Amino acid sequence: MAENGPSYDYTCTLSQETQILAEKELNEDPSTRMLEIKHFRDRLLRYPGLHPKTDPLFLLQFLRVRKFDQERAFEMIVNYYKMKRDHPDIFAGLKPSDMKHVYRHNVLEVPYPFRDRQGRMVCFMYPARVDLSMYTADDVIKCFFMDNWKALQSEETQVRGNTVVIDFEGYSLTHFLSDAPFRYKLAKLWEDRIPNRTKAILMVNESKFMDLLMDFFSQVLKVKQVKRIRRIGRDWAQLHEVIDPAHLPEEYGGTLPDTMDSIGQKWIADLLQCDREMEEEGRYGFVHFTLPPQSRDKTQQDAITHMAGTFRKLSQQ
């Protein structure tokens, strides 16, 4: 279904199977999808001082992650823009090409285009490779943000979510102590702001410091996310229950001839071509957040307080 008009061209790219999943899990109704987007967009455009991005693919990220609950989606997208406003040192002027020095350390790798058995995007994280003597914690957060931005250009990923494999090979107590501020900052920035759906967290090559890490996760992650953590160690059969070994290199018991470092290069190469798109993304956000008292009529005040009527799923009204 496509709708004409500026910033409103949209054709759904979901497979039939994923569309059925979206209806079942996310309350997404193809017959009312554009009405939901329009309602969301119109309310967002009334928010004081905000110049939001309003194309359907972007807005759907927030509607889907909040299961088309308009109120919760609206709260999240405002938090997203507040995050960008409050941390210009991280989010202003982002360009993948400026982060080549971080990407070459392969802290995060995506075995693109392979997905897990549930059709979820897969990414591998390597905490031991974070070297804050070579770049800053903010640089790593910038890369994670841009990786997430690229991932969510796929509607399949918006609906099906992602599986994160955290490989702790070589992770030491020194790493644990040195990257603690980075871990906390990333967790707090991401919570209720970034519209990704992490459906599984798989820990492999676990170190002897896993109990400390589990304490950290239990403090900063929501209970439902902690419950999605699965400790695999080196039991590749468990990993293969989630990811087909035909989509994994030999280092994870798979059959691909290349290493994960080699497989992940396509994702990084594609991302490094996205400078123009990221610069466009940076055009949106808060311009002037404070309204003079005389301009705060009822409509504007409703937008400020997020209480403009009942903004739940439209089809439920």
Image (cartoon, grey):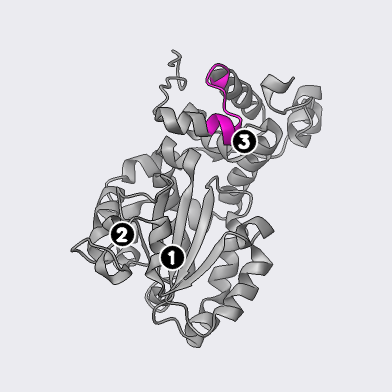
Q: Tell which circle, 3 or 2, labels the residue nearer the N-terminal end.
A: 3
Q: Tell which circle, 3 or 1, labels the residue nearer the N-terminal end.
A: 3
| Closer to the camera in the image, 263 or 195 | 263
Could you tell whether 203 is left or right of 102 in the image?
Answer: right
Q: Which residue reaches farthest top?
A: 4
Q: Is 24 covered by the magenta stretch?
A: yes
Q: How many marks?
A: 3
Mark 1 neighbour density, 10 Å: few (under 14) some (14–19) many (20 or more): some
Tag 3 and tag 2, C-beta contact below 8 Å: no
Residue 67 marker:
3
- Region in magenta: 22-33
Q: Which residue is mark 1?
A: 238
Residue at point 58%, 40% (across, down):
65
Q: How far apart in space, not on screen, are marks 3 and 2 (Cα)?
A: 32 Å
- The x, y position of residue 2, in whole percent, is 43, 16
- The x, y position of residue 27, in whole percent, is 61, 30
Could you tell whether 6 is left or right of 310 in the image?
Answer: left
- The x, y position of residue 148, in whole percent, is 44, 50
Q: How far apart in space, not on screen, are marks 2 and 1 (Cα)?
A: 11 Å
State whether residue 51 appears in this view.
no
Residue 245 marker:
2
Q: Amino acid at mark 2?
A: Pro
Q: Can you say which quadrant of the picture contains the C terminus?
A: top right
Q: Can you say which quadrant of the picture contains the N terminus?
A: top left
Q: Amino acid at mark 3?
A: Lys
